[in-house]
Every structure is written in C-alpha cells, then in structure tokens.
Image: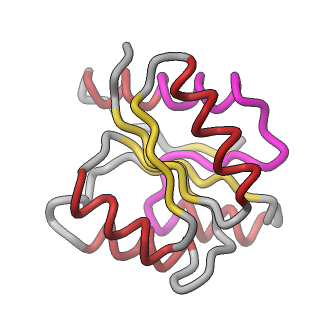
Amino acid sequence: MSGERVLVVDDYDDARELYGEYLRFVGFDAITAADGEEALRCVTRGGCDIVILDLALPKFDGLAVLRQLRGAPATKTLPVIILSASVGPAVQQEALAAGANRFLTKPCGPDELVNAIREILTARASGATDSQET
C-alpha cells in the first residue's frame, strides 16, 4: 500500500513537517496544512485518502474540522486520525463520538502513525470500520 494521499494538519511546524516527510519517505503522498481552514480547503481542492488531524488548531479547531468533514456527503466517510497532546478521556471520547477513526496521543512515533494509517486504509478497502483510541 503506497501512494495514498495523506493530509497532515498541525499548527506546529516541526510536527507537521516531521510527519509529512516521514510519510513521504515510506511511500505516501503527504500534503500538509497549518490550520483548520487550510485543512478544509485541501480536502475540498485536492482530495485525500486519510486525514491526520491535531485538535488545537487556529481558525477552526480539529473538532470543528472533523464535524464539517462528517457533515458533508463527499467526506462523511473520509478516515480521520486525531493526533493530539490533549489526552484527557473526555477529549478522546468527544473526538471518537464526533467520528474520528482513531485517537493517537503525542508524542507519537512515526512508525506508530504509519501503522495506524495502514490499518485504517486496509480496513476501509475491505469494507470494515475502525474506531479506537490509543
């Protein structure tokens, strides 16, 4: 599995670039966005196969982005992994209830993220659903 387009959304430059570069290194077509508004434009304009989404974002926070994606027919089933330092159980529960496929906490090793992406995309290709916290 390679070549799938992954959108990495994080307002922290180092995190966004680290994950984007690593995903490109392992064969994904990674694009990045620095805020919620830019993320929605990227999804609408260029499409993607999966979104890696931080919760603490300027303009629209990650939950607002997730809710907009779930509310639009074209993106309601687009896989979304929340990758956030906000680790409280209530935050995780809210993200999963809003439709996130997975919740990963920062710091998250790049291999852990790649494994989660591959699991979700494989499950999606086989028609299964995936929703869990890590």
Name the spot of residue 78 as percent of width and height, x first.
31, 50
Image quarter hosting the C terminus? top right
Q: Is residue 33 above or below residue 51?
A: below
Image quarter hosting the N terminus? top left
Q: Is residue 134 above or below residue 119?
A: below
Q: Residue at x 33, y 60 (%)?
A: 42
Instruction: Judge whether residue 104 is colored magenta.
Output: yes
User: Is residue 30 or residue 60 the one in the foreground?
Assistant: 30
Q: Residue at x 50, y 31 (%)?
A: 117
Name the spot of residue 110 as percent of width and height, x first.
71, 29
Name the spot of residue 12 as percent of width and height, x first.
73, 62
Name the spot of residue 104 as percent of width and height, x first.
69, 45
Q: Is residue 120 above or below residue 90?
A: above
Q: Which residues are magenta?
A: 97-119
Q: Residue at x 15, y 65 (%)?
A: 73
User: Is residue 132 or residue 105 the one in the foreground?
Assistant: 105
Instruction: Judge whether residue 86 is colored magenta.
Output: no
Q: Residue at x 40, y 74 (%)?
A: 67
